[in-house]
Image (cartoon, rainbow, N blue to C red):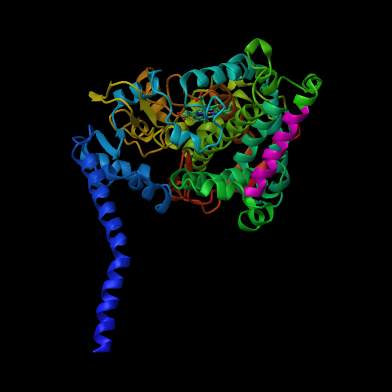
Amino acid sequence: MGSFDSLVQAFFSVGEVQQPLWGGVILALTGGIYVALSRLVFHRLADVPGPKLAALSDWYVAYWNVVKDGQFVHHLAELHRVYGPVVRIGPNKLHFADQAAFDTIYRDPRLPKEPWYYNAFSVTESSFGASDIQAAKHHGNLVRGFFSRKNVLQLEDVIQDVIDRFVLVLATKAHTHDVIDFHRAFASITMEVITTYCFDKNFNTVSYPDFAHPAMIGFHQSNSALVAMRHIPFLRPILFNMPTWLTRRLSPGAMGRINFIKAVDAQISGILEDGSTLDRAEHEIIYHHLLNPKNEGENLSRKSLRDHAMSLVIGGTETVANTCVMATYHVLANSRIKERLKAELVEAWPDVDAAPVNLERLEKLPYLTAVIKESLRKSHGVVYPAPRVVKEATHVGGMLVPENTVVGMSQTFVHLNPDVFPNPDKFDPDRWLFDDVRTLDNNLVPFSKGPRSCLGINLAWAELYLILGNVFRKVDLELAGTKESDLDFNAYFIVKYRGRTMAKVLGVQGAGRG
Ligand code: HEM
């Protein structure tokens, strides 16, 4: 009897404890049903086709980006096959696969960058990171002149000097036919170019053993961490405030990046404390522009100076390197392309020991130009659909998109459109060699379009001509086990090739000039 009593008591006491619990469960369920109905049934995007899970939650995209490690862009191709040219990819987000939509999204100056997406780069006070249209314009105007065609031509020697030093390093590897990782090699060149061009600071990335400078590796590895931090924001303060000893143990790459940022900070401190430091720079650098009173830049905050510096390094390193990797793989993998390119370069630059041919001469070489364009097309530039916010109802790709919707379109949908680029998966420089390639040129959008397109486009083109022109004229490389599938990529913001890109250095000519 006693045990029956205690059983009854236990039942009721459990009930008392669980009452608030049940209340919570019921409240959560009601809330969940309310959110689900408001997103699936009553939402202004409810009629747009797409997976129901994506309409319910942004975790759908997070799953493909984080758990599936940068596969969302590939998954988008499948979604468009199933749902058509407009797909709802989030409660409030649309993705388009339509050339006209691309033009509107990126050319219309009223569509700012989506703050949630861009804040994760932690460079909010720079031209790249600012979402607000006026702020972005102001930041962009401060540095635009520094990357103008005229300025790039004036600083051409800065780029050539880095390449000369790189070729000298390769010459030391040619005797022993060393194998190099050519992604790292190109990223070492491009990082050295951007740091010498912008800061007159030489980090010697091209002469670092195995082209594995910790800062360059650190930036490379941070691509995937950035994606995770965006979708799981509480990771950010944890990772950023970790004690140095723990960071060093968990991620040596992160230390390389941290030390690089410290060096940039130290330069900024030096300039702010003693303005005459700028007079001693070997050439014009980015701070001449950022701190120039004529540019209304003299009152920039310290954070803004640093944000500008970091965004230029981030924007200018892997992008150019990825294009060089695409070119190098296909030139080496196809003897017909290699011989034709080499013949053109030898004709333009017969004596390889003489002074290098300059940028303006290289730009006139049709086959080199075709190889570069095809490499830009196949490496895409920014591969993730850069998100923009529709602030007032706007027609995009034939659809009236309601205000406050986030829209985007990955450049892959332009570059792999078979109606414009037949057999789009093939690397085919010949497609650029016809008299009228205006349609192709209009559909080559690695630098995006419109007011927020690439600020470094002139520098990027100059680097591509000078790096590839010099490397294929002077260096004899052979692929070392790398296959086309090694260029399959994870799509973070830019592409990250999945395989190692290795080549043997068979010989080097004309390394003496450096
Ligand atoms: C092949 C090389 C390059 C490609 C394909 C490329 C591509 C792009 C693209 C697609 C954007 C727009 C991004 C967005 O909408 O969020 C962009 C922006 C930008 N890029 Fe590049 N880029 C390259 C090289 C460079 C270089 C060398 C620099 C260095 C100066 C640079 C600096 C920037 C900056 C500062 C922005 C932000 C512009 C703004 O929003 O105002 N890029 N780039």
Could you tell me residue 251's position as x and y percent? Answer: 61, 54
Q: Is residue 276 above or below residue 1?
A: above
Q: Can the viewer see residue 351 in this picture?
A: no
Image quadrant occupied by the C terminus: top right
- Extreme bottom residue here? 1
Image quadrant occupied by the N terminus: bottom left
Q: How many marks?
A: 0
- The secondary structure making up most of the magenta span is helix
Q: Is residue 269 magenta?
A: yes
Q: Is residue 51 above or below residue 424?
A: below
Q: Can the viewer see residue 291 in this picture?
A: yes
Relative placement, left or right, of 249 versus 438 is: right
Relative placement, left or right, of 121 versus 244 is: left
Residue at point 61%, 46% (across, down):
218
Relative placement, left or right, of 182 versus 68 is: right
- The residue segment tinted magenta is 254-270
Q: Is residue 322 magenta?
A: no
Could you tell me residue 25's position as x and y percent? Answer: 28, 57
Q: Nearer the viewer, residue 447 or 168?
A: 447
Could you tell me residue 185's position as x and y percent? Answer: 62, 43
- Extreme top residue here? 294
Q: Nearer the viewer, residue 304 or 375?
A: 304
Could you tell me residue 462's position as x and y percent? Answer: 58, 24
Which quadrant of the structure image shows residue 141? Answer: top right
